């Protein structure tokens, strides 16, 4: 829960507060005959929308809310059911139980919604009336678990099963840092978005992350017009198969996503990978992005890179998911799938596979360029190391220089480093630690710009330019960007805020030229942001910081403050060494330290 206005309420650290509330029912449900209502738990009653940031800065509504939806075609009697809500804010947690009680029945009509509103978290946004106002309580803005329990059932100990075969749990959702959730935990929405079940509230695959997307809050009450499942979209996007098989040594597996129904208009869908029994650090590369379906297109594909490590292990799995379809498309029932990696190791290798030059070079392509090695480039870097023969000192130097070359390459400088500079230029430091992109969003955006690009291959420059234009157009339409750069800013205000974020490195003529171009339609917000992110003075100022960050992203596959670190002390140490060495990574021994570290080497073997 957010801090209460009561004195000293915020000092109740690690204290759990429990509140039970019986909802008054009389007279509310005169919309249906009780005799028609079912009396058993029904899997068609779903938590369809959750709004957790009511009243905060940028909020659409003053009140938090939870919306339920009957996605089925029969009336369901929810008399005796309970809505159990656990929220946490900092070190405080709270539990609330809302029980439906009636001397008759509580019929929930097909296609209708039921709205629970909670205490305002502030004065921002418009006030909201619900079917059931819940006083003195707000939802956790950062974390929460919401469980819908069947008649006379109580919350099970620990995390509920998914699906719950006992019939006690009808539906449940965990978001933010919640300990309990279905499949994968849903993300915490910004103040102007709600967690909204996809496909009009109809889709449930027992995976909160896949089943919910961010959307403009649209609270609906019992008296709101009903909706019928299947009427929200006229095309369906889903994976082509429930399972994709690959051998560990193949290096890549292709994934196909199909679109059926009315495909006459454009549509998009986001895709992502997450750990199954396989882990991102050891077995595959994090893969995220957006598929763009043009009119008439019925399938798109993306690749997931796999790692040919030296561990003897059983077959492993990677989870795939789809979310946030746009256009006239909804996400079909096959919105999740599994990659099965068949292991190819039968005995442990004599040494760590990363010591082999061919593996080492190949992994640089995976980790820094997000693609398979092209034959010419692979052979060039392999020969670079192998030219040393058995000279161990020479080989060490060549490995260090080879690895550093991937960060310094044109391909990475115009993809990953550009993404880094875009975040630093566009968003304030208060949104992300040190104002730097986080690992997963960096991977997503870098893959968006680099998709299909192989430097020196035919047409690579045109493809890179097309990808880059599309990236900046999408970036300026994102919610966190629009919150910081509302549309009503004048051209001068827009340019000046961006210029301040890069330390005022624009010259007066550069600044005035961008303002004039934006004023007269010769520039757009996207082109101005790109020119500022590509500014040479800004690029030079951020070079060392980006170089250090890429040691963590590329080699260790994590944020600098992720475990085993808890802060940026390691990042600061290497940044100071690199700065003291004048940017010379050899003198700073930075690349050497990362590629020889236990954390890096244990990704691939003992």
Image (tube, rainbow, N blue to C red):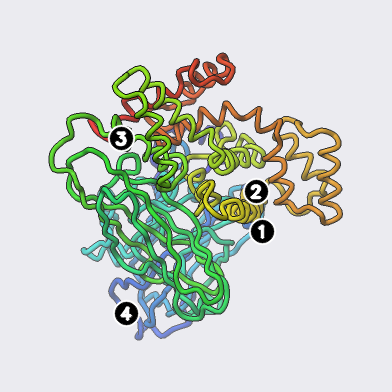
Quick check: marks 2 and 1 in contact, CB under 8 Å? no
Secondary structure at numbered mark 2: helix
The answer to whether residue 138 of the structure is visible from this angle is: no
For residue 425, what is the image quadrant? top right
Q: Earlier in the sequence, mark 3 or mark 2?
A: 2
- Mark 3 or 2: the one toward you: 3
| In front: label 3 or label 1 | 3
Residue 430: percent from left, percent from top: 61, 35
Cα–Cα gap, marks 4 and 1 = 37 Å
Indicate the position of residue 594 as horizontal and vertical percent values: 40, 25
Q: Residues within 10 Å of mark 2 (few under 14, many from 20)?
A: some
Q: Which numbered disc flags the more N-terminal residue, 4 or 1?
A: 4
162 vs 305: above or below = below
Q: Earlier in the sequence, mark 3 or mark 4?
A: 4
Task: Return the residue nearer the eye: 60 or 468.
Answer: 468
Q: Residues within 10 Å of mark 4 (few under 14, many from 20)?
A: some
Tell me the tag on residue 603.
Answer: 3
Residue at point 74% right, 47% down? 528
Report which residue position mark 2 lands on.
481
Measure how far apart labels 3 and 4 are at the Cα level: 54 Å
Residue that mark 1 sits on:
126
Residue 533: mark in rendering: none
The dot on residue 38 is 4
């Amino acid at each position: 829960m957010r801090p209460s206005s009561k004195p000293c309420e915020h000092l109740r650290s690690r204290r759990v507060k429990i509140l039970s509330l019986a909802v008054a029912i009389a007279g509310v449900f005169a919309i249906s005959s009780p005799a028609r209502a079912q009396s058993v738990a029904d899997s068609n009653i779903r938590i369809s929308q959750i709004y957790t940031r009511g009243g905060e800065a940028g909020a659409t509504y003053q009140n938090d809310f939870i919306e339920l939806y009957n996605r089925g075609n029969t009336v369901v009697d929810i008399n005796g059911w309970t809505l159990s809500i656990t929220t946490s804010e900092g070190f405080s947690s709270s539990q609330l139980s809302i029980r439906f009680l009636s001397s008759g029945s509580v019929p929930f009509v097909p296609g209708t919604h039921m709205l629970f509103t909670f205490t305002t978290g502030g004065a921002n946004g418009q006030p909201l009336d619900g079917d059931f106002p819940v006083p003195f309580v707000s939802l956790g803005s950062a974390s929460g678990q919401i469980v819908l329990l069947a008649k006379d059932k109580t919350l099970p100990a620990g995390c509920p099963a998914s699906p719950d075969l006992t019939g006690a749990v009808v539906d449940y959702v965990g978001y933010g840092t919640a300990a309990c959730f279905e499949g994968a935990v849903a993300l915490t929405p910004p103040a102007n978005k709600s967690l909204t079940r996809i496909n009009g509230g109809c889709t449930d695959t027992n995976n909160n992350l896949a089943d919910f997307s961010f959307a403009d809050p649209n609270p609906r009450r019992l008296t709101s017009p009903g909706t019928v499942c299947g009427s929200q979209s006229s095309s369906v996007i889903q994976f082509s198969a429930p399972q994709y098989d690959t051998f560990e040594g193949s290096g890549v597996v292709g994934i196909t996503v199909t679109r059926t129904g009315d495909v006459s208009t454009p549509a998009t869908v986001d895709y992502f990978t997450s750990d199954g029994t396989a882990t991102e650090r050891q077995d595959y590369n994090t893969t995220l992005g957006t598929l763009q379906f043009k009119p008439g297109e019925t399938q798109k594909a993306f690749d997931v890179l796999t790692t040919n490590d030296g561990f003897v292990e059983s077959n492993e799995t990677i989870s795939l998911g789809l979310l946030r379809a746009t256009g006239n498309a909804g996400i079909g029932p096959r919105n999740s799938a599994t990659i099965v990696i068949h292991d190819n190791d039968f005995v442990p290798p004599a040494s760590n596979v990363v010591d082999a030059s061919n593996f080492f070079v190949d992994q640089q392509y995976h980790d820094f360029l997000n693609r398979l090695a092209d034959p010419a480039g692979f052979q060039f870097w392999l020969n670079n190391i192998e030219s040393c023969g058995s000279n161990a000192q020479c080989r060490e130097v060549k490995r260090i220089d080879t690895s550093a070359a991937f960060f310094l390459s044109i391909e990475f400088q115009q993809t990953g480093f550009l993404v880094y500079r875009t975040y630093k230029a566009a968003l304030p430091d208060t949104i992300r630690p040190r104002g730097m992109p986080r690992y997963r969003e960096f991977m997503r955006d870098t893959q968006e710009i680099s998709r299909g690009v192989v430097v020196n291959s035919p047409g690579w420059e045109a493809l890179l330019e097309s990808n880059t234009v599309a990236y900046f157009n999408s970036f300026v339409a994102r919610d966190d960007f629009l919150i910081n750069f509302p549309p009503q800013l004048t051209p001068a205000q827009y340019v000046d805020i961006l210029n301040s974020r890069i330390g005022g490195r624009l010259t007066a003529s550069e600044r005035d030229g961008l303002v004039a171009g934006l004023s007269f339609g010769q520039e757009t917000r996207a082109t101005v942001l790109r020119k500022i992110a590509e500014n040479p003075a800004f690029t030079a100022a951020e070079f060392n910081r980006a170089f250090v960050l890429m040691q963590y992203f590329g080699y260790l596959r994590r944020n600098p403050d992720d475990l085993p670190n808890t802060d940026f002390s390691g990042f600061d140490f290497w940044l100071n060494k690199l700065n003291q060495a004048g940017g010379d990574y050899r003198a700073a021994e930075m690349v050497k330290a990362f590629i020889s570290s236990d954390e890096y080497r244990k990704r691939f073997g003992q």
